[in-house]
Amino acid sequence: MKVIFSHGKESGPWGFKIKRLAAIAEQMGCVVESVDYTDLMDPDLRVDRLLTVLEHQTEPPILVGSSMGGYVSLVASESVETKALFLMAPALYISSFKQQHHHSLSPWIEIVHGWSDDIIPVRNSIQFAQQANSMLHLIAGDHALNEVIETVEGLFRRFMSQGLVNE
């Protein structure tokens, strides 16, 4: 099983959260990749980059995205088969982003969002989760979720355990 991470606007491919979650995926026997978007600020060009990466996959991967990376992962999953999506404080319904309506092909989506997020409104994740009928975890924390990383790790571990059992 392959897990592909997409980082946020101002972070990098091996930031704090990705390192922590990648370690969990690797412990569970997954191959991990984290796409580097640091040279691209346009979210839709980042989607194009992820779609190029996904062209070379032999089986549907699990996509994990944080903030703008959540948008990138979700939009890519609208045209490419994925096993599941794990989105952290996804940057959805941002007026300057091209895609405003989301219809993922992924059969399983989980979202984690911090109640104290002052970058991406919590209501955006609530709106998408309701529309997609997906699992939504609203937790104490801000946009970065770094101060509640243990909670995020627990949710990700459960998500991954369920995904690997369902293979």
Image: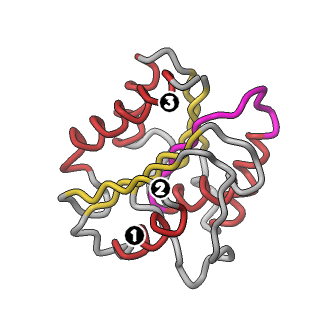
Sequence order check: which comes first, mark 2 or mark 3?
A: 2
Q: Is residue 32 above or below residue 79?
A: above
Which residue is rendered at x = 46% and y = 62% of the image? 90
Spatial CA span between label 1 and label 2: 10 Å
Q: Secondary structure at mark 1?
A: helix
Quadrant (top left/top right/bottom left/bottom right) for the N terminus:
top right
Q: Is residue 127 above or below residue 75?
A: below
Q: Which residue is mark 2?
A: 134
Depth check, front residue: 40 or 31: 31
| Quarter where residue 149 is shown | top left
Q: Which mark is residue 126?
A: 1
**Is residue 51 one of those drawn in magenta?**
no
Quadrant (top left/top right/bottom left/bottom right) for the C terminus:
top right
Point out residue 123 in the picture as x, y percentages from the top left corner. 37, 76
| Quarter where residue 126 is shown | bottom left
Point out residue 133 in the picture as x, y percentages from the top left corner. 49, 60
Q: Which residue is mark 3?
A: 163
Task: Say few, some or many: other residues with alpha carbon within 10 Å of mark 3 (under 14 / 14 to 19 / 20 or more).
Answer: some
Please indicate whether residue 56 sits to the left or right of residue 10 in the image. Answer: right
| Quarter where residue 166 is shown | top right
**Outermost residue toward the bottom in this view:** 95
Which residue is rendered at x = 25% and y = 49% of the image? 146
Task: Say few, some or many: other residues with alpha carbon within 10 Å of mark 2 (under 14 / 14 to 19 / 20 or more).
Answer: some
Q: Which region is colored magenta?
A: 55-67
Which residue is rendered at x = 54% and y = 62% of the image? 132
Q: Which residue type carries mark 2?
A: Ser
Sequence order check: which comes first, mark 1 or mark 2?
A: 1
Which residue is rendered at x = 68% and y = 76% of the image? 98
Depth check, front residue: 136 or 118: 136
Q: Which residue type carries mark 3?
A: Gly
Q: Which residue type carries mark 1?
A: Ile
Please indicate whether residue 47 sits to the left or right of residue 24 in the image. Answer: right
